[in-house]
Amino acid sequence: MQLGIESQIPDGLLAANALLAGNSRQGVPTSTHTLHRGFEFAISSTVLGFQFRCYESASDPVVAPNNVNKQYGGTFPCSSTAGQVMGAVESNFAAFWNYSAGPFGLAFHQPPQMGAGSEIPITATYFGVNQNMGVSVTSMSSSSMSFSTLPGGHLFYPGAISFSASQAGNGMVSFNINLSGNFNGVINGAKYYLGGSAFENAQWNHFLSKVQAYCSLGG
């Protein structure tokens, strides 16, 4: 799979330093009359009719916490219905979501009967050090599912993640992932700029590739 990237991204180390030095009080914006440009980038790929889309925007690292919004999507041939795809994701989410690359890793510990109100533990690994975090399931249906982040370790808090599947016509299914949140303190903001953001992009594109594989195998 080939990725085409258009970016205007501040250097990760400089952004993290600015975040840590700019304001040590979480939730209290730094007073400034200077406009600072944030960044946006897009990633897309087309392989045999399979398209990945990723869009991200983040506010200036001088202000903490920073709002982050990302959207990922894929439209591809599918021998299953959108409802069947969503059902597979909901019943075995960890099989789609668990991912590791280099010094980073994520493991989703799904309970046997996951449903609205369930709290799901997550283990994140950073350079061999485990960090515990979690999400709460806010909704589940045959076409969508949504999580909200829990306090106490998640990179984003408050934060929300939603997943949806829909018929796209001509035997195609669209699958979309949307997430938004604020940095859970300046340390987690630094992790985001020092590799967390790139790892997250890779993880969600890996998730989409798992959805595509499910479609191609017919469930």
Image (spheres, helix red, strand yellow):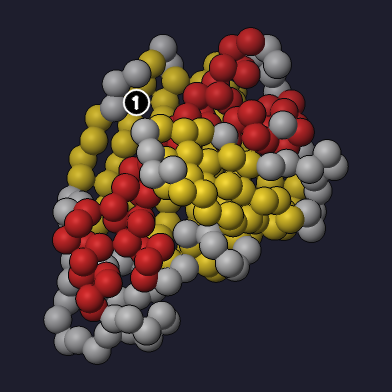
Residue placed most toward the observer, 168 or 102: 102
> In the image, residue 60 lies at what x, y percent?
26, 68
Relative placement, left or right, of 70 versus 39 is right
Position of residue 199 relative to residue 29, above or below, is: above
Query: Farthest residue toward the front?
Result: 128
Q: Amino acid at mark 1?
A: Ser
**Residue 82 shows up from this direction:** no
Secondary structure of residue under mark 1: strand
Q: Is residue 109 left or right of residue 6?
A: right
Tell me where residue 43 appears, x and y as whole percent.
31, 36
Residue at x 38%, y 16% (from the top left corner): 47
Q: Where is residue 1, by image quadrant?
A: top left
Residue nearest the viewer, comparing 146 with 26: 26
Residue 57: horizontal and vertical position, in percent? 33, 56
Q: Which residue is mark 1?
A: 45
* Viewer-nearest residue: 200 or 102: 102
Determine if residue 97 is in view.
yes
Could you tell me which quadrant the C terminus lies in? Answer: top right
Q: Residue at x 20, y 57 (%)?
A: 13
Residue drawn at 20 percent across, 86 percent down = 32
Task: Classify 10 Å Cα crowding around label 1: few (below 14), some (14-19), many (20 and above).
Answer: some
Give the residue furthest to the right: 113
- Name the spot of residue 142 as percent of width and height, x first: 76, 38
* Towards the viewer: 51 or 194: 194
From the viewer's perspective, tell me whether residue 11 is left or right of residue 210: left
Quadrant of the rendered structure where residue 49 is?
Answer: top left
Number of labels in the image equals 1
Q: Residue at x 47, y 59 (%)?
A: 155
